[in-house]
Image (cartoon, coloured by chain):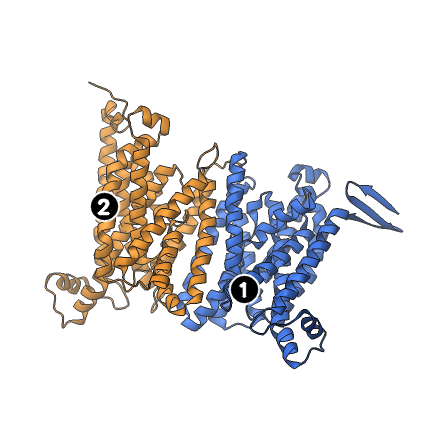
Amino acid sequence: MTATLDPATAPSVVPVAARRGIARRTIGMVLLIATTVIAVPLSLAVGAKPIPLGPVVEALLSYDPTDTDHLVVRELRLPRTIVGLFVGSALGVAGALMQAVTRNPLADPGILGVNAGASFAVVIGIWAFGTTSVDDLVWFALVGAAITSVVVYALGSIGRAGATPVRLALAGAALSALLFALTRAVTLLDTATLDQFRFWAVGSLSGRDADIAWSVAPFIVVGLVMAVGVSRSLNAIGLGDDAAAALGVKVHLTRGVSGIAIMLLCGAAVAAVGPIGFVGLVLPHAARALFGPDQRWLVPACAFGGAAFLLLCDTAGRVIARPSEVQVGIMTAAIGGPAFVILVRRMRMVRL
Amino acid sequence: MTAVVGTARVVRAGSFSVRVDVRSVTVCSLLLVGILVVATWSIMVGDFPLSVRQVLSAVFGDGGDDAEFIVQTLRLPRALTAILVGAALGMSGAVFQSIARNPLGSPDIVGFQQGAAFGAVLVIVYWGGSSLAVAGGAVAGGVVTALLVYVLAWKRGLSSSRLVLVGIGIGFTAAAGVDYLITRADIYDVQRAAVWLTGSLNGRSWDHVRTVGLALLVLAPLVIIGQRSLDRLDLGDDTAAALGVRVNRAKLGLIVLAVGLSALAVAAAGPIAFIAFVAGPIARRMVNSPNACVVPAAFVGAFVLTAADLVARRVLAPTELPVGVMTAIIGAPYLLWLLTRRARTGAL
C-alpha cells in the first residue's frame, strides 16, 4: 500500500471512515440533485396563474401554441427557469471558489464588490456605447468583474497578515459604495438608462427570455468546468500556500485559473440577471456542513444547491406578495443578510 | 482668571468655569471662515451668476427682486442645509467612532444610514409623506437599525470588528429593502427617490433647514455635555467606570443622540455616504487630540459637505451631480487608504 501525502487521496489511508463518509456524501448529493429536480416543475407551475402539473408536463412534451397555459409555461416560465438554473449554479460555485481562494468565510460576489463592478461596467455599456443586448453586455460585465476582483483582492491582502476576512469585506464594501455611487451618477444623467437599468439592477429573473440563457450559458459552462478542474488543487491550497507547493501543486496557476472561473461565473450571472448577493455566501457554508471541506464535493454541491436555492427563492418571490412579485435578488438578500450576521457571530474575531 | 493645561485654558468667572482648548477654538474659527467662503461662493454660481455684493445684500433683504428670489428661496436654504447636515453627520460620526473605538464604526459604514433611508423611503412610497413624516420614518428606521446592530453584535461584550461586520450585513439587508420599495413605485417617484438616495442637496427648502436645524439645536448641546463621558469611555470601559462614568447608561444615551443626529440629516438630504466617516479622523488630526472632538468634527463635516456640493454642482455644469456621488468619490479612497495603512501597521 502506498500512502501518499496528497490531501485529496489522503482519506484512502483510513478506508472504513472514508467509505462511510463517501456513502453519506453520495446520499447528500442525491438529495441535493433531487431538490433541484423538484424545484424545476415548481418553478414552471407556480406563479400569478397557477398551472397544474399535468398541463405543465403536456406543455413540455406536446406543445400546443393555442393553449394559454402551454404558452405561459413555454414562453415565460421555461426560459426563466433555465436562466435561474444557470445563474444559481454560477453564483453558488463562484462563492465556493472565492471562499477557497481567499480562505475567507465571508467571501461572496456581492460582499466583495464584484457585483458592483460588473453592474457599473454594464451601465457604462448601456449609457456610453448604447449596448442593449445581453450578448454584448456580458463582455462589459466580465471586464468589470475581473477588474474589481483583482483590485479588492490586492487591497485586501496588503500587509503581513494577508487577506483577512475583515479587510476583504471592508475593501469590498468601500469599492461597492464607490461603484454604486458612480452607477447612480450615470443613471441620473440619463433617464432612459435608468429606466432600462432599474429592474435589472435589483436582480430579477422576471422577463428573462431564452436568448439570455443561451448567450451566458457558454461562459457559465466553461467557468464550472474550470472550477471542477481546480477543485483538487484548491484542497491543497486550503492547507496554506507553502504546504500546497510542497505537495507539488502549482499555487499561482491554481489561483489564476480559479480567478478566471470566478470572473466568468460572476460576470455572466450579473449580465444575465443583475447583481444577486448572498447566494455565493450561503451555499458553500450549507454545503460544507453537509459534505465537509473537500472541494471536489463542494463544487458540484454548490452548483446543484445554488440552482435549487435560486429557483426556490424566485418561486417563493412570485407568491409571497401577490399580485406583485418580489425580485429574487431581494429574496436572497432577505435570507442572506441574516445568514451573514449569524456567520459573523460564529466567527472568532480578530481585533480590528 | 485663566490656567493653562497643555493647549487648554480654563476660563473661570466666579464659581463657573469652562475648559477651552485654544487649538480647537483656532481650528473651528478657521473652518468657520472656510465654510462661509465656500457657502457664499456656492450661492454666487449657477445659471444666474451673482456677485459677492449681490449675494450679501440679497441675504439681508435689499438686493432687488430677482437676486432676492434666487438667493432666499433657492440657494440660501440649499447652502444652509449643506452646512447643517454636514455638521450633524460629522458630530454623529465622531460619537460612534469614539464609542466603537474604531474609525470604521461610523453610521454610514455600519448600516444606520441605510436603515434610516429604508424608513424614509417606506414613508415616501406608502404614505406620500410630508417632510416631517419622512423625517419621522428616517429616525425610526435609524433607531431600529442601530438597536439591531448593537444587539446582534453583542456576544459577551462588543468586539468592534464584529460590530462593523454585523453592520455591513444589516446595511445590505436594509439596502435590499430600499430596492424592493423602489421597484414598486412609478418611474417619476423612482427618479426622485434615486436622487434622494444618493444623497442630494438639490431643491432643499427652508423645511429641510428647519428639520436639521432643530435637531442640531436640541441634540448638539447634549452631545457636547456628553463629550466628558465620551473622553473617559475612550480610556476603556473599566477605567471609565473607575472615573465615575455609568458606562452602559452613558453609551446608550450617546448612541441615541448620535442616531438622532444622523437620521435627521438623512431625512433632510438622503444617506450621504462618508461624511460621518471622514469628519472625526480629520478633526482629531487637525486638533491633534486623542479625544472624540465632537465640535471640530461638526465643523469639518459642514466644510467637507459644503465644498463637495459646490464641486458636484460645477464639475459637469450645467448638469448637477448629487453630492453623494462626490462624497463617495472622496470617501471611498480614504477608506481604502485607511485599510492599507492599518494593514501595514498590523492594526487590522
**B126 relative to A137 in the view: left or right:** right
Q: Residue at x 25, y 58 (%)?
A: A135
Residue corresponding to mark 2? A222
Residues tagged 2 and 1 counted as in contact (Cβ below 8 A): no
In percent of width and height, residue B32 lies at: 70, 58
Q: Nearer the viewer, mark 2 or mark 1?
A: 1
In terms of secondary structure, where does tag 2 sit? Answer: helix
Q: Visible in this render: residue A266?
A: yes
Of the 4 image quadrants, the one containing the N terminus of chain A is top left
Identify residue type, mark 1. Answer: Arg
Q: Is residue A216 left or right of residue B346?
A: left
Chain shown in blue: B
Residue B153 visible, this angle: no
Q: Which residue was labeled with disc 1?
A: B314
In the displayed orientation, state which residue is furthest to the top: A1
Drawn side of residue B194 relative to residue B88, left or right = left
| Mark 1 closeness class: few <14, some 14–19, many ≥20 residues within 10 Å | some
Seen at 33% across and 50% down, the residue is: A143
Q: CA distance from mark 2 to mark 1?
A: 46 Å
